[in-house]
Amino acid sequence: MTATFAIFADYHQFYIRDDDPSYGDLSDAWTPESTDRLLALAPHTIGVGTARNMTVPVSMSILAQRPTLDAATFDRINEAAIEIATGRIVLAGCTDYVPDAPRIPCAPGRYGVLIGYRNLTRLSEDGLDGDDSYHLYLWPANG
C-alpha cells in the first residue's frame, strides 16, 4: 500500500503516530540534536523535520518487509521504529486538527520506519516554495 499526502509542516515538522489520542506529544523530544537529525521520537510517535514551514508532499508505503533504499536518491535517510496499538496510523502536521487528519489502517504491532528526505536544499530564496519531499516506508518489525 502506498499513498501520497500534502501535509502542512508547521514549525518545520509533521507527525506519524498511533491513533490513540494520548500519544503525539513531541514537545520535549525536539532537542538541538533531533532538530539537526530531522527526527524526534516519543512513545508511539515519530516527528519528521522538514526543510520548509509549508505544505509538503509526503508518501507513505506499508510494506511486507524492510525495503532497500538507494541512498543516492535521497539527501538523508533516517531509521526509527513505532508501535501502533490501534491499527491506525495518523499522519498530521503538529498544528493540524487531529480528528480531520488522514488515518492509514494497518495491523496493530511494531513497525520499522525508514524516512527518506529529498531535495532539502532546493528551496526558493524565501524558503516558502521548494522541491523537498518526504518518503515513509513502514514494515512489520519484531521486538
Image (cartoon, rainbow, N blue to C red):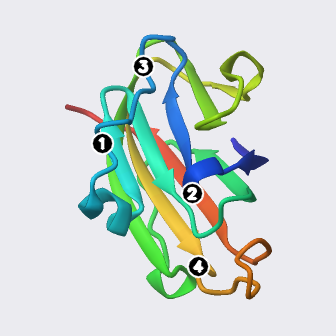
Mark 4: amino acid: Leu
Earlier sequence position, callout 1 versus callout 4: 1
Please identify, in this view, whether the residue under mark 2 or under mark 4 is nearer the observer.
2
Mark 1: amino acid: Ala
Are dots 2 and 4 in contact, CB under 8 Å? no
Residue 121's x, y, as percent? 60, 86
Q: Label 3: which residue?
A: 23
Left or right, residue 67 beside residue 103:
left
Q: Label 4: which residue?
A: 120
Mark 3: amino acid: Tyr
The front one of 64 and 51 is 51
Residue drawn at x 52%, y 66% is 116
User: What is the count of numbered marks?
Assistant: 4
Q: Residue furthest left?
A: 143
> Quadrant of the image for the N terminus?
top right
Residue 17's x, y, as percent? 49, 29
